[in-house]
Image (spheres, rainbow, N blue to C red):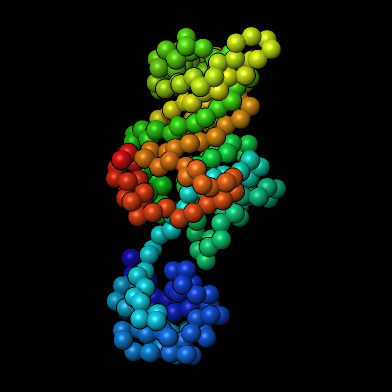
Amino acid sequence: MSKVMRLDKFLSEMGIASRKETKEYAKKGRIKVNDAIVKSSDYKIDTDKDIVTFDGRTIAYEQFEYYMLNKPAGVVSATVDNNDRTVIDLIDSERKKDLFPVGRLDKDTVGLLIITNDGELAHSLLSPVKHIDKKYFARVEGIITEEHIKRFKEGLKLKDGTLTKPAQLEIIKSGNDKSDNISEVEITICEGKYHQIKRMIACVGGKVIYLKRLSMGSLKLDENLREGEYRRLTEDEIKCLQNGNGEQ
Ligand code: URA
């Protein structure tokens, strides 16, 4: 979509220079629009038609931003909140006011959260008809055993009567007795009901004490990101997510 905007806004949104820096660089003749030096940073450009270069390098306009956040506990998956810090507060971007999280993780859940301003992609990733897989690691108070795998596979009837779609349960560690009643599991679900993992575990008599999202469709949480850290998605990661079902 074509946009008319000031040169300084354009360069700061593309992460090239702050508005103040753009003013200086423009004065020094380092910025050209369609091969002509532009000395004023409030010059208006059309993102579709004009070619902007900085030090000879062409700066392509990117309409959307895509981030992978390793969500920490204690922040809410919202754009604004009166009481708590939001996931958007963690992102440093010129387009902060347009960004939103793709879906929600509970306040105490950590792990993969996509942040973007691309409503179409978000809608397609969250669409119930697309069945995008979401994989979680959970530490559970309670003993989860092989028997539960079948129940998850068949779909569970939650305590309020809600039926879940088939889910995959992998046991990493099964608590075995009173002295060790902590189990660790990985659960893959293709829907996103409210508190779904916690309710599924409660349904088989356990209590989730730690929950982390590991992946969403083809996108895996980057292990180099510590909680609270984020990075931009790569071109390939974006393409895979756009590829219909989010699978590679
Ligand atoms: N299931 C939950 O119970 N909580 C989350 O945050 C995500 C999935």
Q: Quadrant of the C terminus?
A: top left
Q: Residue at x 55, y 34 (%)?
A: 212
Q: Say which of 31 and 165 sits in front.
A: 31
Front residue (pair 34, 16): 16
- Vertical position of residue 110 compared to residue 140: above or below: below
At x 57%, y 39%, the residue is 110
Quarter of the image with the N terminus is bottom left
Image coordinates of residue 149 in percent, x first then y, are 44, 15
Q: Position of residue 224 (x, y in %)?
A: 51, 47
Relative to 122, residue 96 above or below: below
Look at the picture and state if 138 lies above or below 44.
Answer: above
For residue 79, say whether it is visible: no
The reply, left or right, for residue 243 in relation to residue 160 is left
Give the answer, above or below, for where 45 lies relative to 242: below
Tag count in the figure? 0
What residue is rendered at 39% in x and 45% in y? Answer: 123
Q: Is residue 178 visible?
A: yes
Q: Position of residue 29 (x, y in %)?
A: 43, 90
Horizontal side of 70 relative to 189 (left or right) equals right
Q: Residue at x 51, y 36 (%)?
A: 213
Q: Is residue 58 left or right of residue 99?
A: left
Q: Nearer the viewer, residue 79 or 10?
A: 10
